[in-house]
Image (cartoon, grey):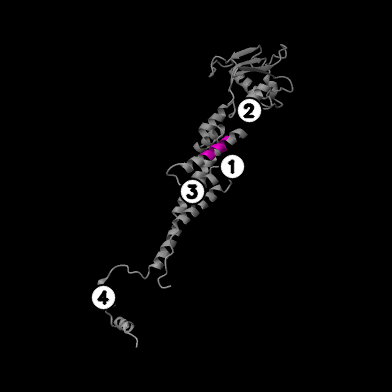
């Protein structure tokens, strides 16, 4: 199995809230939480990660560019980047085993080409690296437990196993219905009743004696036992 | 789903079926039915119906009631 990728660093230049180059070093800790007062640029860090791994080089959070807004690609650059002649860009550095790879993505040019390292890392994601608050709330508050289960299984690439599980449940209930099918039992009952309608249901000694000693039966028995001449 | 992941899942399901069939106390014929119809990476749409029919047929074969001789026939 290939070595996993770990972020070493993230650099923002003229990007979102960061006009001057700012490098975040992730090499010391594998888990990271960002705490800072409002307006400090927390979202810009997340935006930089999303920008780096978005195929079309935009941000879902900012929405599409419209006539009366500054959304879309134009929102990626810091407001003063052009004036300060700073080329907006995001750079990442990742390590896999002992190999460190760097990649940089320009945020202002028309093409905004995704670097090779980002493409490689992107292909490794089973779950989207960015999970928005509203998506999380929907997941927790609106989805049924079954939907959550299916979602998690799909995120873990285990969708077919959920399908197998669903089929097994369905098969179990259908077999139960077939096993408890009264029609089959009634058919057997009817057949049994037909086959045993001549059977003696209970021993009645008096009736047996009467039958054996009845004159008609005795006469028949005598005739059948008499030797023919 | 990535092809590599799908292959691993199919391998897992095959191994699960084989393991189930070899397990002591597990009905081998039932395990074979599950392996054939249910434990697959891409089961057919009517896999459950097919598996149910196969199990019902198996049960009918095993029940195989002896034919009652007709007393007056």
The magenta segment is B8-15
Callouts 3 and 4 on one subunit: no
What is the C-alpha distance between the residues marked 4 and 1?
72 Å
Q: Chain of mark 3?
A: B
Which residue corresponds to mark 1?
Answer: B42
Viewer-side label of 3, 1: 3
Q: Which secondary structure dominates the residues rendered in magenta?
A: helix
Name the residue beneath numbered marker 2. A123
Q: Nearer the viewer, residue B72 or A104?
A: B72
Looking at the rendered structure, the secondary structure element under dot 4 is: helix
Residue A150 image offset from top left, x and y in percent: 53, 36
User: Residue A104 colored magenta?
Assistant: no
Contact? badges 4 and 1 (CB < 8 Å): no
> Gap between marks 2 and 1, in whole Å?
24 Å
Q: State the SS at label 2.
A: helix
Which residue is the site of mark 4?
A209
Q: Is residue B22 above or below residue B66?
A: above
Mark 3 sits on what residue?
B29
| Distance in Å between CA atoms under marks 3 and 1 | 21 Å
Instruction: Evaluate whether label 4 is on the same chain as label 1.
Output: no
Distance (Cα) linking label 2 and label 4: 94 Å
**Do tag 3 and tag 1 residues touch (Cβ < 8 Å)?**
no
Would you place residue B14 above or below residue A34 in this image? Answer: below
Pointer 4 local density, CA inside 10 Å: few below 14, some 14–19, many at least 20: few
Residue A140: x, y in percent?
A: 51, 32
| Upstream in sequence: badge 2 or badge 4 | 2
Which marked residue is nearer to the observer: mark 4 or mark 1?
Answer: 4
């Amino acid at each position: 199995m290939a070595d996993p990728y770990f972020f070493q660093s993230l650099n923002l230049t003229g990007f979102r809230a960061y006009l001057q180059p700012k490098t975040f070093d992730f090499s010391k800790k594998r888990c990271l939480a960002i705490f800072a007062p409002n307006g400090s640029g927390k979202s810009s860090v997340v935006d930089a990660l999303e920008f780096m791994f978005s195929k079309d080089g935009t941000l879902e959070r900012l929405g599409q560019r419209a006539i009366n807004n500054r959304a879309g690609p134009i929102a990626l650059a810091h407001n003063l980047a052009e004036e300060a002649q700073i080329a907006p860009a995001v750079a990442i550095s990742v390590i896999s085993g002992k190999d460190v790879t760097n990649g940089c993505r320009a945020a202002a040019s028309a093409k905004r080409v995704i670097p090779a390292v980002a493409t490689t890392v992107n292909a490794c994601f089973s779950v989207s690296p960015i999970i928005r608050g509203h998506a999380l709330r929907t997941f927790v508050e609106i989805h049924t437990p079954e939907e959550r289960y299916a979602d998690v299984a799909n995120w873990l690439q285990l969708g077919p196993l959920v399908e197998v599980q669903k089929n097994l449940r369905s098969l179990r209930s259908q077999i139960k219905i077939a096993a408890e099918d009264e029609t089959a039992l009634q058919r057997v009952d009817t057949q049994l009743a037909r086959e045993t309608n001549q059977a003696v249901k209970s021993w009645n000694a008096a009736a047996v004696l009467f039958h054996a000693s009845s004159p008609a039966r005795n006469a028949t028995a005598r005739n059948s036992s008499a030797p023919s001449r | 789903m990535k092809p590599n992941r799908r292959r691993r899942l199919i391998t897992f399901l095959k191994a699960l079926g084989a393991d189930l069939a070899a397990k002591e106390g597990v009905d081998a014929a039932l395990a074979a039915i599950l392996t054939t119809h249910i434990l697959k990476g891409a089961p057919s749409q009517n896999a459950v119906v097919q598996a149910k029919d196969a199990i019902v047929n198996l049960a009918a074969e095993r029940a195989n009631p002896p034919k009652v001789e007709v007393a007056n026939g």
